[in-house]
Amino acid sequence: MGKTLFEKIWEQHLVTSRPDGTVLLYIDRHLIHEVTSPQAFEGLRMTKRRVRCPELTLATMDHNVPTVDRMNIKDPISKAQIEALTQNCAEFGITLYDLKSDRQGIVHIIGPELGLTLPGTTIVCGDSHTSTHGAFGALAFGIGTSEVEHVLATQCLVQKRPKMFKVEFKGKPKPPVSAKDLILKLIGTIGTAGGTGYVLEYCGEAIRSLSMEARMTICNMSIEAGARAGLIAPDETTFNYIAEGNRPFAPKGKNFEKALAFWKTLPTDPNAKYDREIIIDASQVAPQVTWGTNPGMVTDVTGKVPEPNQVPGYSAKDVEQALAYMGLKAGTPITEIKINTVFIGSCTNSRIEDLRIAAKIFKGRKVAKNVQVLVVPGSQQVRKQAEAEGLDQILKAAGCEWREAGCSMCLGMNPDQLKPGERAASTSNRNFEGRQGKGGRTHLVSPEMAAAAAIEGHFVDIRNWKMG
Amino acid sequence: MEAFKSHRGLIATLDTANVDTDQIIAKQFLKSIKKTGFGEHVFYDWRFSPDGKPNPEFPLNQDRFRGASILVARNNFGCGSSREHAVWAVHQYGFKAVIAPWKESNGLRIPGFADIFRSNSTKNGLLTVELSEVEVEEIFQMVNRYKGLEATINLEEQRVTLNLPEEISFHFEIDQSIKEHLVRGLDEIEQTLQHENAIKAFESRHNLQFG
């Protein structure tokens, strides 16, 4: 019987099987950042252990960094965390892209940018959105700090083999419907725990038609469906992305040719078996907007805020609690929800393509009165590229704030936070209570939907709206 | 790591599904570079009102749950962010175990806990117990009926027993690797380092450049 992409990568990274049914899986790339690594390094020091493969470990600062005046961190605790990472990397010999580096950025943005993220590799990071890298056909997943310490010490992880879930998007999304809408639609369909215990493999005509940036948006949110990892088989789009651009860690010349031959062996064989399958018609997907306090609480832009007893998979009590937190009344059309903040950024939607889309919509227009718009590029490279293309000028002329790279308002660990009661259209990945700031209300949308909402001051069905 | 064999303690109930790790430990507490001091911040935004006073509505602020060491919640506990700080917070607050129901949806079993949370719990000696929705509902009802209800969780026997005159007990399934890890209180890194030869052999045949 044929093998899935996942099975091939899994088997190629098996170090040994353990008697209890778990395996030791070898890790090719370990990405670390300031928030989930300090306790792991402390553990190494206490047990007098070393970092086994510092050359396979790469660090950056992203979660708590300010996006204005970033060399001058005012919060002493944030500063101490940044300093701890600097010191730990120096002590253990790990390459660090710090705030002075033009390669700094959100860890899941810089991995692909640097050419570190390659098909057929295993990649882990102490961050649940590590699933992003699966867009390249890499088995990539988030881990906790104890596991960060384990990988630092052994370059391996103890893992139980997950099940495989095939997610086929047939047909093509009709622009301006985009990747974000497809993944939100999936999460709304299977629920936030529907993928728990599985690796999702996305396939179908829609996926093949998407750029690498858009594929990363899809894989990024696998964890919002409960799946630790999402995968997309590498193809010409993938190979071209790796070959183009300035990617210092990507193989070059003869090595590239050898790698390419190997990458082409990775896609799932025709007769391989999955544990579960679902088909979604991408051509029928409408722009999506979340109305509740988790990414599964989502509906079409043409929909209404639901009645508490009419949401499959949620108890009336859960929906009532969500609506109370969100300050929404059942029956309100989504397009009547007014917003006062727009966040364009995060590892879900802060790549150059996302900023180009936003700039196209903002060009020659103005942000609505009383709406604040933050545009936070995912990396300093994205920022530089956007500035070279003049996107920053367009965005600033429209009234957007143009910031420096980091996770920013996606999780509000830095000063970019919603205030109680503020309502945001956000291109990020989580609408949990308090996620973007205590009492803040988040609606997850695509960059297209966020930009349109910024201009109109409320959500609009971008299919019937002049996109610019 | 401290071993977990059996534990008896007071039950606290939290009648919410999809409790995410942002809720368990809010972002402002992730800046610490230490592994301790998280317990007092657990469920911060639910436990405390905007003025900083304890919210009397929140179960853990109620007298009947003071000193609880077993937390019972609804499905998909610990979803979202991979932050292990969430497990440290629950554990350091005093909980030794969390119980959540698996549920059935279209003939499929939806686990009671998010994957990363469960894995992080195991590494820290916090037991996650999955029961059926009916069983968890029964615990909720019994806790409402009997103030101060305690339970005994025997991991070796895979059994949760409500300490009532008329004993109610539930068998639970658990991954054998997790059970062994907890019962023996193993140091996973130490175990892996014993496979040094296998790791070295793997590294010599594995071409990192090409995966």
Image: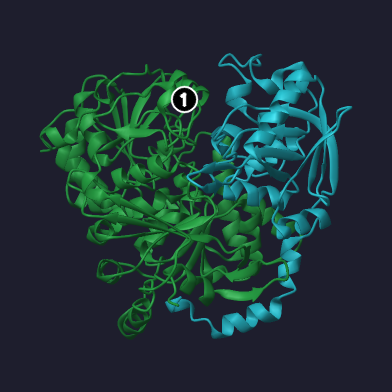
Which chain does the residue under circle 1 lie in? A
Name the spot of residue A168 as percent of width and height, x first: 33, 57
Question: Which residue corresponds to mark 1?
Answer: A319
In screen coordinates, is B88 left or right of A335?
A: right
What colour denotes chain A?
green
User: Residue drawn at (61%, 42%), measured in percent from left and top?
Assistant: B102
Residue B181: x percent and y percent?
Answer: 76, 57
Q: Which of the 4 image quarters holds residue A71? A: top left
The foreground one among B195 and A20 is A20
| Residue A104 appearing in the image | no
- What is the three-letter code of the residue carrying label 1? Val
Relative horizontal placement of residue A297, taking residue A454 as reference (left or right)? right
Q: How is the image coloured?
A: by chain
Q: Is residue A72 above or below residue A111?
A: above
Chain B shade in the render: cyan
- The picture places residue B123, in percent across and down from the top left corner, at 70, 53
Screen quadrant of the C terminus of chain A = top left
Residue B93 in the image, given as x and y percentages of width and height: 74, 33
Question: In the picture shown, does residue A327 fall above or below A284?
Answer: above
Judge by depth and name the residue closer to the eye, A202 or A127: A202
